[in-house]
């Protein structure tokens, strides 16, 4: 049987644990898997660019489990009162290929993106960082705020969006969180001034320049999340040229990240090397660091592992017959030959009047 987790199940899991604790534990799963980097089959995601958006598959596997995510990105969807990003995920056994988990992954993607951002910032930003500018207050913004509060220790969030309604939504959702002060500057420049960390999570699918070099101050850490597909950027190229740049999986980020603006030989460092201690992240207090985040399949794999472990331990989600289970594995035809009235939910087939068993 395959465990199925829907939106209500995700809500139950997160509420029973608490969103901040959920994100923190998820970050630990992500860190653990990045430390096993060389055990994974890795490839850039498979992307179909369609009018107004993109539809992608993100697969990876280790020696035991295979995971993939289906995800889209259609910024125009909000005009139709639909989500920009929608996703589901699957986790399967490598040995047999049997799907263990079929899960909602829209909310889960938001959680894992924030957990990844904060995890990477915890080893790249200055240790005393407490103030973050959050540029773009859409669907991902609250998750980033909670992650940076719980993992990095951010106490002040400066929020700005060109859509005042988005900022109002953010304030409404986060205002009750203890230990977090929300400031509402009137411009990107005002929000960024004096910030320890700058997070950009804008949605428009175009070459944008949200942050310019004159806004960047010594020692800043920039968490660039919104530039995540070809033709979509947020940071001026000169910011990248002057900074130490970190990525998840270089072959994918070269295509999709902000570094798509730069030559193929521009030096970047994959984050697994920093997390494992092979290389240092920040080299000085004054250095500007950039995490050019596009999202990578290992992070989804980690989230699927985490969800599966939680669901198994708490018995949340339904057991579904996603895969046929015939008594004779060489006789799949019985599932279409027998009259529907003779089939039972446990795949046991009584002898039909026509003797098809």
Image: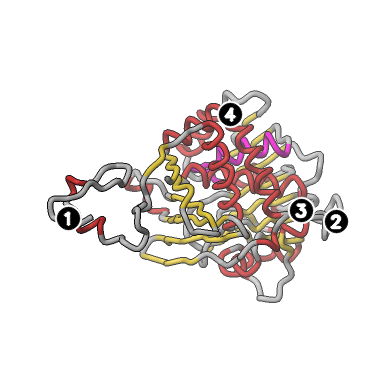
Q: CA distance from mark 1 to mark 3?
A: 62 Å
Residue marked by disc 3: 275
Callouts 3 and 2 close, C-beta under 8 Å: no
Which comes sooner in the sequence, label 3 or label 2? Answer: 3
Q: Quadrant of residue 273?
A: bottom right
Q: CA distance from mark 4 to mark 3?
A: 26 Å
- Tell us which disc is closer to us: 1 or 3: 1
Neighbor class of circle 2 (other Cα within 10 Å; few <14, some 14-19, many 20+) is few
Residue marked by disc 4: 17
Mark sitting on residue 283: 2
Callouts 2 and 1 close, C-beta under 8 Å: no
Tell me the magenta residue range: 136-152
Q: CA distance from mark 2 to mark 1?
A: 75 Å
Q: CA distance from mark 3 to mark 2?
A: 14 Å
Residue marked by disc 1: 355
Neighbor class of circle 4 (other Cα within 10 Å; few <14, some 14-19, many 20+) is few
| SS label for mark 2 | loop
Q: CA distance from mark 2 to mark 4?
A: 36 Å
């Amino acid at each position: 049987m395959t465990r199925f987790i829907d939106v209500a199940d995700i809500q139950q899991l997160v509420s029973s644990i608490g969103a901040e604790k959920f994100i923190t534990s998820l970050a630990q799963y992500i860190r653990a898997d990045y430390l096993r980097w060389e055990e994974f089959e890795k490839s850039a995601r498979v992307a179909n660019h369609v009018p107004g958006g993109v539809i992608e598959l993100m697969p990876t596997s280790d020696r035991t489990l295979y995971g993939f995510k289906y995800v889209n990105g259609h910024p125009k969807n909000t005009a139709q009162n639909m989500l920009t990003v929608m996703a589901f995920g699957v986790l399967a056994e490598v040995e047999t290929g049997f799907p263990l988990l079929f899960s909602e992954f829209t909310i889960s993607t938001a959680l894992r993106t924030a957990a990844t951002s904060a995890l990477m910032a915890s080893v790249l930003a200055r240790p005393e960082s407490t103030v973050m500018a959050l540029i773009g207050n859409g669907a991902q913004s609250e998750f980033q705020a909670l992650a940076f509060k719980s993992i990095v220790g951010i106490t002040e969030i400066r929020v700005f969006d060109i859509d005042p309604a988005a900022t109002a939504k953010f304030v409404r959702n986060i205002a009750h969180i203890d230990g977090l002060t929300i400031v509402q500057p009137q411009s990107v420049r005002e929000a960024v001034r004096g910030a320890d960390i700058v997070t950009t999570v804008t949605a428009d699918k175009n070459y944008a320049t949200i942050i310019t070099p004159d806004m960047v101050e010594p020692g800043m850490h920039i968490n660039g999340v919104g530039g995540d597909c070809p033709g979509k950027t947020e940071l001026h190229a000169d910011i990248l040229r002057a900074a130490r740049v970190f990525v998840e999986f270089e072959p994918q980020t070269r295509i999709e990240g902000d570094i798509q603006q730069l030559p193929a030989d521009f030096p970047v460092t994959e984050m697994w090397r920093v997390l494992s201690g092979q290389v240092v992240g920040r080299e000085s207090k004054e250095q500007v660091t950039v995490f050019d985040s596009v999202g990578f399949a290992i992070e989804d794999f980690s989230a699927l592992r985490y969800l599966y472990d939680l669901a198994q331990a708490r018995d949340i989600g339904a057991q579904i017959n996603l895969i046929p289970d015939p008594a004779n594995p060489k006789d799949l035809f019985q599932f279409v030959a027998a009259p529907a009235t003779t089939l039972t939910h446990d795949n046991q087939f009584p002898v039909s009047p026509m003797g098809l068993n």
